[in-house]
Amino acid sequence: MNSNESNFNINDFSKSQLEEIQKGLEQKLNVSVYAKKEFLAIQMRQIRLGLQDKLPVEKYANPSFDWFQMEQIRMGLKDGIDISKYAKPEISYDRMQQIRLALLDNIDLSAFTKLEAGILKQLHLGIKNNVRIVPYITQGYDDEQLEAIREAMEKKLPIDEYVNKTFRGIALKEIFTGLEHNVDVKEYAKLNLTWQQMREIRLGLEHRVDVSQYNNHLYSAKQMKEIRLGLEEGLDVSYYKSPIFAAKDMYKKRLELLDNPKLAIETNNKNEPSKTETQFLQKINISLSPDEMEAYLQIDKKYIPGRINIIIALTDKGIKNGIDFEMVDAVSKGEIDQSSVIIAKGTPCIDGKDGWYEFYFQTKSDNYEELLEQDKIKFSQIEWFETVNKDQQLAYYHKSIPGKDGTTVTGKKVYAKRCKELPLLSGTGIKKQKDNVTYIANQNGVIMLDGYTLKVTPLLKLKEVTASTEINFTGNIIIEGNVKSGAKIHATEDVLIKGTVESAQINTEGNLILQKEFIGYKDATIRAKKNVIGPDFELVEIYASQKIIGNKFKNCILYAQGQVKTVGQDGMITGGSICAENGIKTVNLGTQERIPTFIKIGKIERFKQRENNYNSIIRDVSQELFTLQNALKEFQKRFSPELRNKMEMYLKIENAIYTKEREMENILKQKHDLLEEINKSETACVEITDILYEGVTVEIDGTKYQSQKTKGVILQKNGKVIDEVYVK
């Protein structure tokens, strides 16, 4: 028997406890630390994991701590923080967690351990983001309310008038979202409305509809939604907006109205004309055009009807609108030498015009998708930014022009096109004027439009960046000249450099656009959260979360989560190492001199690592669930329902199982999304439109290919081999 085993009797332990002890023995751990019957298996697991990481587990190997508390202490020890701030049995695990996370940001919340975990979280984030929410904590706001208040304060929204403890946190979020989107929140910031009702009114205001048609607390949120959608579609909602209709009935009637707008008032047009069977009417024939917009009179040339007879014939046919009485008189006097004339015309409808925005800047400059798809780019002429000045008018909204319904000759309504309003613009750095249709810039900067989000972000303009200069800017950067070796640049938005770049380090949370070459020879790196675009790159490491696009890449290390693409007739990738999750498209690949070039696409390391991480978490959570469920069964065997349902430990185990099951659902969904992303990457290929030289190694999802000189080829994986598909 192992020396670790000699100190305990296996008959004292449950199966789950013995499994944890056995795992420790297999890992050659000192299991005597936790091989004690007072520890549940799930507690043993936390101690075993700590021993496995060589942590001082004596800090938490105490039955007074439950397994969740043990986990938070173990994670704190692993992170190297001061666990004495929270490693106390009387502090619940969720409070421990928030104190631990705050300590990771060098924020000490140990003086606030009596606050609920959710409030501790908001206090942590408030301190971290320089937002003072302590007054609201002392006033007794709960964690959901504090979250809404904190987020609004971070956005510098004018919330004081609307902060009220009676509003739930989610209702406050609806009010603050309205403030952010420039709508009149007084329309719905009312205590007798639920947050769902508030949302429907807010969305209606954002889409410029007449919310007074449903701004009534007697409507349910679902009823409000059906009326709102009808108003957005330009429908006559009076057809179904009565509160007597349930939401599902409103839904059906809205769809009916979409298919047939006449339903709203066609019930007024059900009177059928009478039939007059007289001898003279048999000689008068009235016919209608298919759309009933014209009526035709056909008569026997030998018979000249009297005026009254024509009127009777028209009446019997149901014609009541647009009668041409001059033509009636002419026919009755025999002045018309025709067998058929137009005797009545309906009133045509006049279509309305949807609301529209007039922008006072070149919106196309913000949409770079077109640029990214081009096969030829004039890099020196790229004008990426459009700048505006504070108080400059940015946009004007033209409200919709109502249409005018028409009428057929039989009096039926002909409906004009229903006009719609567009949503309000929202964003940062802009201000809506009191007229509710004019938008101006609230600061100097770069204007960007994305859908209905309009932003003005700060801009830093520099003539050049000299050697060893370090720049850190919140916003966009334009550099008119060169960037010298050793320079470091960081921007939270896009960076445009018009001159040559030498061995610099550039980090941007947006796009990097170069008009000239980037030549590196030491510590030359680019990291971009979006795209990297430029003509020539040599000896540069580039990491882009989207695409990397250029004309020539020489001996570079490229890593793109999107595509790597060369543009221009002489586009080429020569030497270096290129990883691209969504494939590579280039004119030429490699060189005549056979310079080693390594290509890797598809399911690359980032995917594999993430998949492995998910699998590891799934295994751990599955094991924890298994252990918890076994512990639950032990309690169920030993105690009656009446007794165990009052036991704190049993209730903790039940809650832990619920929490772990939700965690498992969440991680399985994340893994599913990852696998879909992997499936997309597995269709990636390498496309060479001109010459593929010898000396290129291509790896697609683990399968390798050594190139021979060829022309016009697509390399794609097929099973366990890489196929060559030749193109003209």
Image (cartoon, helix red, strand yellow):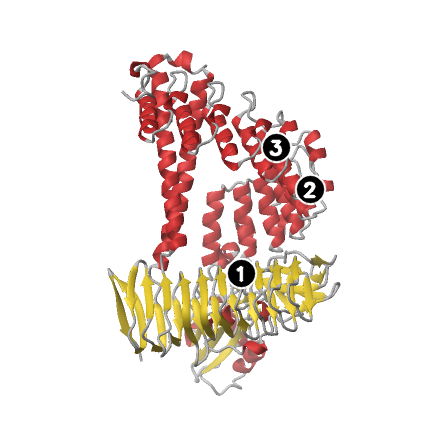
Q: Sequence order check: which comes first, mark 2 or mark 3?
A: 3
Q: Sequence order check: which comes first, mark 1 or mark 3?
A: 3
Residue indicated by mark 2: 131
Q: Sequence order check: which comes first, mark 1 or mark 2?
A: 2
**In terms of secondary structure, where does tag 2 sit?**
loop
Q: Do labels 1 and 2 touch, CB within 8 Å? A: no
Residue indicated by mark 1: 528
Q: Position of residue 635 (x, y in %)?
A: 37, 17
Residue indicated by mark 3: 120
**In terms of secondary structure, where does tag 1 sit?**
strand
Q: Position of residue 572 (x, y in %)?
A: 42, 75
Asked whether, in this view, residue 185 is left or right of residue 26, the answer is: right
- Which of the two residues, 603 or 78, is positioned nearer the viewer here? 78
> In which quadrant will I find the N terminus?
top left
Asked whether, in this view, residue 155 is left or right of residue 668, the answer is: right
The three-letter code of the residue at mark 3 reads Leu
The three-letter code of the residue at mark 1 reads Ala
Of marks 1 and 2, the one in the foreground: 1
Alpha carbons under labels 1 and 2: distance apart: 29 Å
User: On the image, which quarter does residue 695 sit in?
Assistant: bottom left
Asked whether, in this view, residue 539 is left or right of residue 140, the answer is: left
